[in-house]
Image (tube, grey):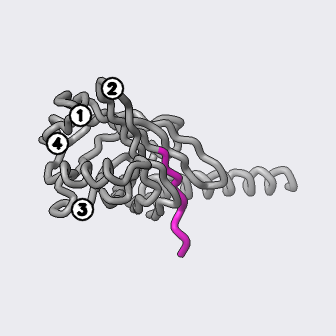
Amino acid sequence: MLRSLARTTAAAAAVFALSAMLGAAAKPVASHWVLQSSVLTYHVTHPLHKVDGVSHAARGMGVCAQGVCRFLIADQVKTFTTGDSARDIHMQQVVHAALYPLITVRTTVPQADLTASQIQATLVVQFAGQKVTFPKLTFALHRQNGDIRLTGTIPATVREFKIKPPQLLFMPINNQIPITVVMLWAPAKS
């Protein structure tokens, strides 16, 4: 009798656990993410020198519901600095920062992908009055204490954003302006 009761209890617990898992799979719990910190670095190469512009000011949020996560990241063009204020002002003029002061990035990814060590995401970037799609970029994900650290590179070019390449001594910068991304995402506190 005692064994029969133990088997019945174990079977009931297994059925309860399985139904809870199936219920969770059918209706994923919505989650909210906040960009805690970021380092965005654009790299410019000129025949005479290389320059990096860095911003730590990006803001972002993500909302996950029904198995899909939508993320939005925004940064002001003026927050990118190279250590040379004249160069930074010239960069802002070249990309028409007065007309288009924000850089925005949007992406949608499956919620399950946030548990992997790498993620592929298609990014839609608005910058300098242009909208450019970067399909299937790979980013590394590192999780710690519920937070996610995301690292990777966006292979941007001057041409795709229709920016006239700045020149020094009549020599333009290279077309490639890759952007290195390091972001720390944390679950939003309610």
Gap in angstroms between the C-alphas marked 3 and 2: 29 Å
Tell me the chief SS of the magenta region: strand
The residue under label 1 is 168
Counting residues from the N terminus, which is met first, the one under dot 2 or under dot 1?
A: 2
Quarter of image, res 103 = bottom left
Asked if disc 2 and disc 1 are in contact, CB closer than 8 Å, the reply is yes
Counting residues from the N terminus, which is met first, the one under dot 4 or under dot 2?
A: 2
Residue 116's place in the image compared with 48, above or below, is below
Gap in angstroms between the C-alphas marked 1 and 4: 20 Å
- The magenta span reads 182-190
Q: Residue furthest front?
A: 169
Residue 48 marker:
2
Front one among 51 and 65: 51
Residue type beneath disc 3: Pro
Gap in angstroms between the C-alphas marked 4 and 2: 23 Å
Q: Is residue 35 magenta?
A: no
Residue 161 marker:
4
Residue 101 marker:
3
Residue type beneath disc 1: Leu
Using the rendered image of the protein, determine whether residue 120 is visible from the camera's viewpoint.
no
Q: Is residue 188 magenta?
A: yes
Dot 3 surroundings within 10 Å: few (below 14), some, or many (20 or more)? some
- Secondary structure under the numbered disc 4 in the rendered image: helix
Front one among 5 and 141: 141
Quadrant showing the N terminus: bottom right
Gap in angstroms between the C-alphas marked 3 and 4: 14 Å
User: Is residue 161 shown left or right of residue 48?
Assistant: left
Residue 52, x across and y down, in percent? 40, 40
- Secondary structure under the numbered disc 3 in the rendered image: loop
